[in-house]
Structures are given as structure tokens and as C-alpha cells.
Image (tube, rainbow, N blue to C red):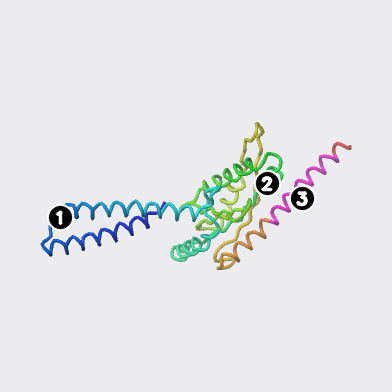
Amino acid sequence: MKYSGRLWLALLSFNATVALNVYVFAQGISSLAFLFISNMWVLVSWQIGKYIDKLNYELDRDALTNAYSRKVAAPIYRKLTRKAVKAKKMVAIFFVDVDHFKMINDRFGHKAGDLLLQKVAVHLSRLPSDPPATVIRWGGDEFVVMVLCQTEEEIAQINRKLLTNMDYVSSQHTVTISISTGYSIFPHHGNELEQLVEFADTQMLWAKRFKKLEQSDRFYLRGERNVR
């Protein structure tokens, strides 16, 4: 959680307190009670600032998964691209969709579906990257992950790590969660976030279709062997 709110308020209160104390003593007024109250105000300001920081943190985060909310994606992206340009790096934008989420949600219930999304968010946040990956809940069972990278090989490696299956236990049943991903790269595929997310989303949809075709082929070949 950032400390900007409490630091700003405490700093303003401290400066105001110092100015008031200087003025009061310059007038020849000496009051320990005033000194005590003015110093206490600095502490109160710190606590008020702490509350403001907490509110800002909660507004920036998705309440269910604790990933960043979509409304803060643009400023986060701009900050990352500035770092990338300065360090001569790239920003990878991964679009992530949970496979068969509706089926799992319908079968095990909404509470189980919520827990599943929380587990996916944790999985995404544990990517091996420096600085850590930024995970954003884009909507429903979709996430966007932003990562500062040096090479395209590093991006491909992160994508492979993302696709690692997760086991999820719900109502005495173990469900294997899989996700589909697509990615785009700043600046190779564009400069605007929406443009890069759209490109990554399209790649994800192709990956999902290919996965379904692959599963259908395996089912068909297994059935053909059984007929023979």
C-alpha cells in the first residue's frame, strides 16, 4: 500500500504546526497545551492519511481477486512503457481467459467459481519476472498481465509458465484449471494499450480454437481405434 496520502497530510500538518508555533512564540505566548495539541494534530493527520491510502488501495483493486481493476490499467501501462523506453526493453501484454469457466461455475456454484478466479489471480502474480508482473482483472474470467521484458524468448518463456495447469479442489472434487493466452508486445504491435489488448485477445481466441480442435482430433482418433 502506498504512503502518499499520509505523507502529504503529515507533511502539511507538520509545516502548519511549525509555522503556528513560531508565530505564537514570536508573540511572546508560551503554552505547553498549544504545543501538545499542535503536535497531536500531526499524528491525527497521519491516521487520516492512512485511511485515505487504504481507500485508494481498495479503489485500485478488484474486490474479489485483489488484482488491479481495469480502470487503473492505462496509468500502469503508461508507467511501464516509460520504463521500457528508458531501459530499451519491451512490455508484454498477455490476455488470459479461463477455460470452461462457465461449466465449472455452473457445476460447483458461484462461490467455487469465485475461489477459482482468486487462485488464477495468485497463479498469474507469481510469474518469474523482475519487476513483478502486473495482474489486472479485465472482466469476468479474463485477466490482462503486463510484464517488462528484455527479449522475445523471455516473453515466450513467461507464456509457457502461464499455461501451467493448476489443480483446484472444490466440494471434494479436484478440478484441473487450464487457461488460454495470447500476447502482444510494445512497441512491436502498437503503442496504445487498447490496441495491444485487442491484438492479444485475438491471439488468445485463436489459441483457444486450436486447443479445441486438438482435443476433438484426439477424441476422434481414440474413437477410431476403438471401432477397429
Q: Earlier in the sequence, mark 1 or mark 3?
A: 1
Magenta stretch: residue 47 in it? Answer: no
Q: Amino acid at mark 1?
A: Ser
Instruction: Please give the residue where the numbered disc 2 appears in the rendered image.
Output: 101
**Mark-to-mark CA distance, 1 and 2:** 67 Å
Picture coordinates of residue 71 (x, y %)?
54, 60
Q: Amino acid at mark 3?
A: Leu
Residue 126 against residue 59 in the figure, above or below: above
Label 3 SS: helix
Residue mark closest to the camera, 1 vs 2: 1
Residue positioned 62% across, 38% down in the render: 168
**Mark-to-mark CA distance, 2 and 3:** 18 Å
Instruction: Please give the residue where the numbered disc 1 appears in the rendered image.
Output: 31
Highlighted range, magenta: 205-224
Picture coordinates of residue 35 (x, y %)?
19, 54
Please tell me how many numbered marks the rendered image carries: 3
**In the rendering, which numbered label is found on residue 213?**
3
Residue 182 against residue 100 in the figure, above or below: below
